[in-house]
Image (cartoon, grey):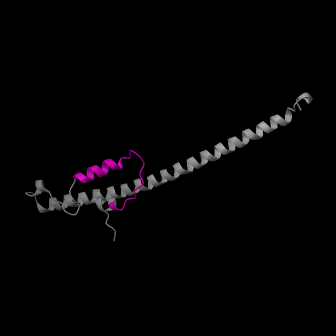
Amino acid sequence: MVCKHFACRAKAAPKTRIKNFSLRRLRALRATFPQHHRLDFPAARGQHRGMADANSRRIEKVETNLAHLEHQVEQLNSVVIEQVKLLERLKKEVQRQVRAMESLELERIRSNNPKPPHYQ
C-alpha cells in the first residue's frame, strides 16, 4: 500500500520542474516540520487525550489533501511541459511553411516578370 502522507509522496516525485515554481517553497516549509509519523503536541500535553487525537486526525487530513494537491500540481506540470514542447514544434513548422511560401511567391514573381531580351 502506498503511503498518502505528504513527506512520503515527495520522495517519489518526478525531478522535472518549471523554473521558479512554488513547490520549492512547500518543500522548504515541509523541511522545517518534524516527521509525519511522530506527532508531538507539547502544548497539548496537559489537555485531554481526545483533543490530541482530534489534532492528529486533522493534521493527517491536511497532509492527505496536500498530497492530492501535490499530485495535481505534478500532473499540471507535466501537461505544461508537453504543451511547451508542442508549441516549439509548431513554431518550427510554421517557420518552415513561411519560408516555403516566400520561395513560392518569389518564383511566381520571377515567372510573371521575364527579363528583357537585352539582359538574356
Q: Residue at x 48, y 51 (%)?
A: 81
Confirm whether the magenta stretch covers residue 105: no
Give the left or right position of residue 41, taking residue 87 as reference.
left
Place of residue 34 in the rendered image (x, y in percent of width and height, measured from the top left): 20, 57
Most extreme residue toward the right is 117
Q: Residue furthest left?
A: 46
In the image, residue 5 above or below residue 30: below
Q: Residue furthest bottom?
A: 1
Q: Is residue 23 covered in magenta?
A: yes
**Residue at image x 33%, y 61%?**
11
Q: Say which of 65 and 7 sits in front.
A: 7
The number of discs equals 0
Q: Quadrant of the N terminus?
A: bottom left
Residue located at (23% from left, 60% from top) = 36
The image quadrant where one finds the C terminus is top right
Q: Which range is magenta? A: 11-32
Counting from the top left corner in percent of width and height, residue 47 is at: 9, 57
Q: Which image quadrant for residue 96?
A: top right
Pinpoint residue 77: horizontal percent, then vertical percent: 44, 52
Q: Quadrant of residue 115?
A: top right
Q: Left or right: 71 with respect to 8?
A: right
Between 43 and 18, the one lying in front of the other is 18
Give x and y (percent) for residue 10.
33, 59
Asked if residue 38 lies left or right of residue 15, the reply is left
Residue at image coords 56%, 51%: 86
Tell which of 68 and 107 is nearer to you.
Answer: 107
